[in-house]
Image (tube, rainbow, N blue to C red):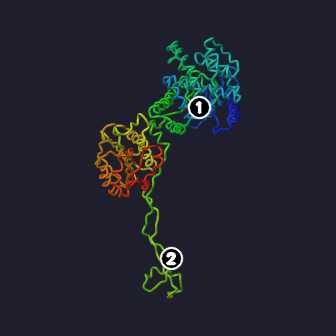
Amino acid sequence: MTNKDLKQTMQEQWQKVRDSFYYPQLPNPELREDIPNGQLNFQNLQISVSPKYLEELAGQGVSEDTSLNAILGHEVGHFIDYPGSVLNLLRLHKIARENLDEKKAFGLRESFLNVQNNTNLVQNKGYESISTISKLEATKTQGLNKIFSGLYQELWGKDLGVKLDRNEKELVKELQKIDYLNKDRQEQNFRKFMNVIKDYQTEQNNQEGNQNGDGQDSQQQGECNSGDGQGQNQPHSSLDAFSDNQIKEGIRQFAKESNPGEFEQIIEEVLKEAKEGYEKKQEQVRKGYGAGTERGNLIVARNFYSALADNFSIPIRHKKMHKNGTLYPHSHEEFSMDDNVNDLDAFSSPGIIPGVTKKWVRKEGESIEDYLGVPDSLVVIDSSGSMPNPDSSVSIPVLGATVIANAYLDNNAKVSVYNFSADNIVVGPSKNKERLHKTLRTYQSGGTVFNAGTIEDIVKKQGNIDISIVSDMELSNLGDFLGYVSNLPNVHRVHLFYTNSGSIYGIADELKHKENIAILPLHSQEDIKNITMGELKKSII
């Protein structure tokens, strides 16, 4: 088949695939000579197929129509349905890590997703091409790949030529009981899948030893399921089907249902797959097998509080309306000879006629002053032993301080952070979000040692600045100090966010006459949602 004919055939199969998935907004696929088989470019979501790979399949009796239909359908199926979202992928990995080490968790997760994807394509979308290529590759499978080929044979009711021994048949029988396509019970079904497989997986790893590098791991990582056009030894992560923005969104959502420790473990492992997959695939491309990838270094927040803070957006109130001193004509009055002739309305009468000629009454104009954008910010956080440990559970003070810092950073302002306890940790002024977040999250767990001079030094070195203090407020002389610092000419507004209600009212009484100081509670995520920086009327004083 000529290259022109192959392109036409690919377009015909692409339209069939798009129709079966209700026309997803994906670019047309392309033929590429520099890849071994097929791949999905996660950045532009374009599927690429190697003409040489199609030629190899044709040599084994598989037509180009069938091969293209299987490859294109499988890649779109991963993107649309299984896993369908980064959040779903992270949830499955979290479940797998409850009982398995990192490598086994990765392999089992990808195997489960491939069983779902291929079975959905065959049973619900009528992809005979998947079963055709599965039968071609089934005879080469061993270990878990052979088990999954046997499972396909039973689930699809098609003879793939797989011969199983008695123990393998029993294992397939147990796997066959799982409802792989029930998305409402996907997590429960994955637990069943994991429980059935993990004992067999351990047994096979012990038997195989180092024959395949890490035992059966190389056979469990998603390559066992045919129709992906990626060969039997191709390490593959479902994360590859998503763009950086989709990954960041999934991380943001996952943070809402996790604690700091498990979140950072799962995120680190799943993101590491992208980096390791990139390196392995480049090596495989050089050796002539396995699909290449264009994924480089993915820079996303691995700090739990960075991800969780992205679920909040708090406004900053700009400076109020100011008179600009410009006078403009506002209304008429009768002109008298004692008035300034410059106020005369020369068009009110033909000449100066007593009782008829008018003068302009001028008023001072008003305009919204831009205030040069949002002021810079100083976020002061108490990390003494009386504050919650941000590493053991969700710390509302750290989360709140991170959200506040983001509000200023997102408005192109600079932020300084002063973390006080046993030591004084100062960062900024800076726009480096990762560095600022890390400092806010640092837990010193020492005494409550508040250095007023540190804050004063930071404030005096900057221009207009807002100050936010997050603490349980068990600080001596805080009221006196804030009364002083709030009078500095470049201090715009001061916000005290208290985490301990019992310690705040003495300070509130000291500061009740200060118009640019607000005292606000910070006990829950709802309190964070209610914050408006610069809105002083919500203060308890």
Residue furthest front in the image: 502
Which quadrant of the structure image shows residue 318?
Answer: bottom left
Residue occupying image coordinates x 51% and y 88%: 353
Residue 291 shows in this picture: yes
Find residue 389 and report its horizontal and vertical position in percent: 39, 36
In depth, the one of 220 and 151 nearer the eye is 151
**Mark 2 is on which residue type?**
Ser
Q: Amino acid at mark 1?
A: Pro
Q: Quadrant of the N terminus?
A: top right
User: Closer to the N terminus: mark 1 or mark 2?
Assistant: 1
Viewer-closest of 533 and 62: 533
Would you say 225 lies left or right of 434 here?
right
Give the number of marks: 2
Q: Secondary structure at mark 2?
A: strand
Rendered location of residue 513, percent (x, y): 35, 58
Q: Quadrant of the C terminus?
A: bottom left
Question: Which residue is nearer to you in this view: 281 or 486?
Answer: 486
How many neighbours does mark 2 have within 10 angstroms: few (below 14), some (14-19), or many (20 or more)? few
Mark identifier at residue 331: 2
Name the residue that disc number 1 marks.
83
